[in-house]
Image (tube, rainbow, N blue to C red):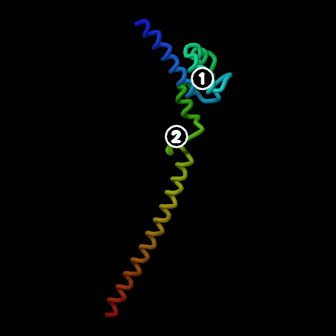
Amino acid sequence: MLRALMIILPLALAIYACIDCVTTPDDEAKYLPKVVWVFLILLFPVAGSIVWFAVGKTRKSPAGGRTPSEWHRNHRTEWVAPDDNPDFLKSLRDENKKDESLLKDWEADLRRREEELKKREQDGDKDQ
């Protein structure tokens, strides 16, 4: 049991440190590039993980009591989904306005044609 624990704990620590390092934004990794930190964690699982957690990352408490994942969600540089992108949503609204305008023009044209057709039918009935 103790042998298994001696293998599982360092492995879990290294996996957690590696995932934490990879998901950390580049500008929050201190002293070394993230790639080097990952190699250190993988080559020296216990020591690399401990050093990563001790000095490898800028640790700040999020403003307003938010969790770090919320902070990263609100400060992304790339959009994950189109419904998160305000430019995309604006383009949809603009297209919707164009489509509505086109539809109104078509409806007006249809009404005009229907009125012309009714006039022709009425004029045809009067001539007979």
In screen coordinates, is 4 left or right of 78? left
How far apart marks 1 and 2 lie (CA) works out to: 28 Å
Q: Nearer the viewer, residue 43 or 23?
A: 43
Residue 14 place in picture, x, y as percent: 52, 18
Question: Is 13 located above or below residue 99 in the figure?
Answer: above
Which numbered disc flags the more N-terminal residue, 1 or 2? 1
- What amino acid is found at the position of numbered circle 2 in the picture? Val
Dot 2 alpha-carbon crowd within 10 angstroms: few under 14, some 14 to 19, many 20 or more = few
Q: Residue 2, how many percent across, how many down?
A: 43, 6
Helix, strand or loop for disc 1: helix
- Which mark is on residue 39? 1
| Tag 2 secondary structure | loop
Give the residue type at disc 1.
Phe
Query: Which residue shows up at 50% across the image and 14% down it?
Result: 10
Q: What residue would you read off at disc 2? A: 80
| Residue name at image x 65 percent, y 26 percent | 33
Disc ID at residue 1: none
Q: Residue at x 60, y 29 (%)?
A: 25
Q: Quadrant of residue 5?
A: top left
Answer above or below: position of 86 versus 7.
Answer: below
Q: Position of residue 53 (x, y in %)?
A: 58, 17
**In the drawing, does residue 83 fall left or right of residue 57?**
left
| Callout in the foreground (1, 2) | 1
Q: Quadrant of residue 27?
A: top right
Residue at the outermost bottom position: 128
Image quarter (top left, top right, bottom left or bottom right) of the N terminus: top left
